[in-house]
Image: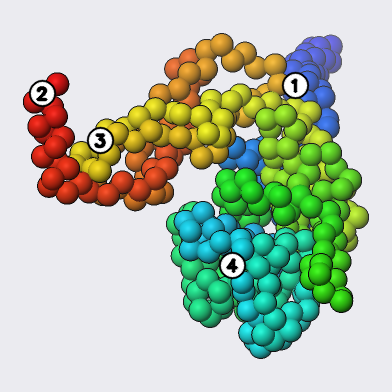
């Protein structure tokens, strides 16, 4: 009898210990249903990121080094847009195709050796048709040779802190020692999107090159999401037999811009469907809280011995933080911390940071760069400024 009672006691004790575990498991299951854990099941690697803050919403093998195919051109377009912004080239400049550029296989706009196109048309050829020939022509225009341009691509990758990226060409054609990761591609895509003009190209579904010639060339965007997904306006597709189907995509609704990168998808239909699902999840679950919009004056910084004694800090792009929908925003605040500056100051030079808080918790830190260059003032300017101070 005692043995039976002891067995019954042990059985009840075991059940009582198991019940809380079972209850906990049941509570977690609904939270996981339809969550980000179910996204991009067919991709070898994927990431979902808020473009403004860089906050990662979802990732899967995002640091794996993989062949990027034509997503390589995200970096190519970034260097082109930077050259336009700093005045190295203009959209109206003519670019002449070399024999080497014209010899590129794969996706192309069929440039003839010696043929000239404007920078504007070359960007269209890269963004819409994924032109390998146009990419090399622009590389040669900016750096003299493709090899020298590729060196600049790798230099930029280092500046952005990309640890799983190395470029061997500017277009993504298969070659050795050419790789990237979904994470790194998202970071360079985010940097490219800071040049807001790029989506005027990547968001086009179709256009023409050689419009006034006898043989106009019809361009159709290889990224079909720009036509079929509301808010999608970029960025770059990619495919090789080794890389499979890749895409760095972006979409914007209201103030929320999302970047989704997938690599190694089995086909275009799966690739597009899974990216669309990633976008759906982000737009359904998250909202953005704007701190500064592009063009807003963020503050002023004093400059010692400069041609100007003060420089207004203007937002080059939107600064915002990503929040779950329904999150209260009344206690969100920011601090602009700027370093003392002494001329000369170069455009793009790091000068401080913008820190966003919710209560006492830091939500995000943004680096702040100089929006313009300020030269060192000459002695006459400094004397005038000193004398002016005496009389005021």
Closer mark to the observer between disc 3 and disc 1? 3
Q: Are marks 2 and 4 in contact (CB under 8 Å)?
A: no
Name the disc covering residue 309, or none.
Answer: 3
Is 121 or 24 nearer to us in this picture?
121
Closer mark to the observer between disc 4 and disc 3? 4
Circle 2: element type: helix
Spot occupied by residue 379 in the image (x, y as percentages of width and height): 12, 47
Between discs 2 and 1, the one toward the N terminus: 1
Circle 1: element type: helix
Q: Is residue 379 left or right of residue 294?
A: left
Q: CA distance from mark 3 to mark 1?
A: 62 Å
Closer mark to the observer between disc 3 and disc 2? 2
Between discs 1 and 4, the one toward the N terminus: 1
Name the disc covering residue 24, or none.
Answer: 1
Q: According to the image, label 2 marks what residue? A: 391
Q: Is residue 239 left or right of residue 269?
A: left
**Is the N terminus in the top left, top right, bottom left or bottom right quadrant?**
top right
Vertical placement of residue 6 versus 254, above or below: above
Say if residue 301 shows up in the picture: yes
């Amino acid at each position: 009898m005692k043995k039976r009672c002891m067995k019954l006691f042990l059985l009840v004790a075991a059940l009582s210990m198991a019940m809380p575990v079972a209850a906990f498991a049941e509570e977690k299951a609904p939270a996981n249903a339809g969550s980000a854990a179910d996204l991009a099941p067919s991709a070898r690697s994927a990431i979902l990121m808020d473009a403004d803050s860089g906050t990662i919403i979802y990732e899967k093998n995002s640091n794996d080094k993989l062949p990027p195919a034509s997503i390589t051109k995200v970096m190519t377009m970034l260097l082109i847009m930077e050259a336009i912004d700093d005045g190295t080239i203009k959209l109206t400049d003519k670019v002449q195709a070399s024999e080497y550029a014209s010899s590129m296989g794969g996706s192309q706009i069929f440039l003839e050796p010696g043929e000239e196109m404007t920078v504007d048309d070359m960007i269209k050829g890269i963004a819409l048709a994924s032109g390998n020939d146009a990419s090399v022509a622009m590389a040669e225009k900016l750096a003299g040779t493709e090899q020298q341009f590729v060196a600049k691509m790798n230099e930029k990758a280092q500046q952005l802190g990309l640890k799983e990226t190395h470029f061997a060409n500017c277009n993504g054609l298969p070659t050795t020692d050419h790789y990237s990761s979904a994470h790194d591609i998202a970071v360079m895509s985010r940097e490219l999107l800071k040049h807001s003009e790029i989506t005027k190209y990547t968001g086009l579904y179709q256009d023409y090159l050689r419009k006034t010639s006898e043989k106009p060339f019809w361009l159709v965007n290889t990224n079909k999401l720009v036509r079929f997904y509301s808010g999608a306006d970029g960025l770059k597709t990619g495919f090789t037999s080794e890389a499979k189907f890749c895409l760095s995509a972006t979409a914007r609704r209201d103030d929320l811009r999302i970047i989704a990168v997938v690599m190694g998808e089995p086909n275009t239909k799966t690739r597009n469907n899974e990216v669309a699902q990633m976008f759906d999840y982000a737009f359904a679950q998250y909202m953005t809280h704007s701190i500064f919009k592009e063009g807003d004056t963020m503050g002023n910084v004093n400059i010692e011995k400069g041609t100007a004694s003060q420089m207004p800090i203007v937002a080059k792009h939107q600064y915002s933080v990503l929040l779950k929908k329904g999150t209260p925003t009344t206690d969100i605040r920011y601090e602009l911390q700027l370093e003392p500056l002494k001329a000369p100051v170069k455009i793009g030079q790091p000068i401080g940071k913008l820190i966003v808080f919710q209560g006492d918790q830091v939500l995000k830190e943004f680096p702040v760069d100089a929006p313009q260059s300020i030269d060192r003032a000459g002695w006459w300017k400094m004397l005038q400024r000193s004398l002016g101070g005496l009389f005021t």
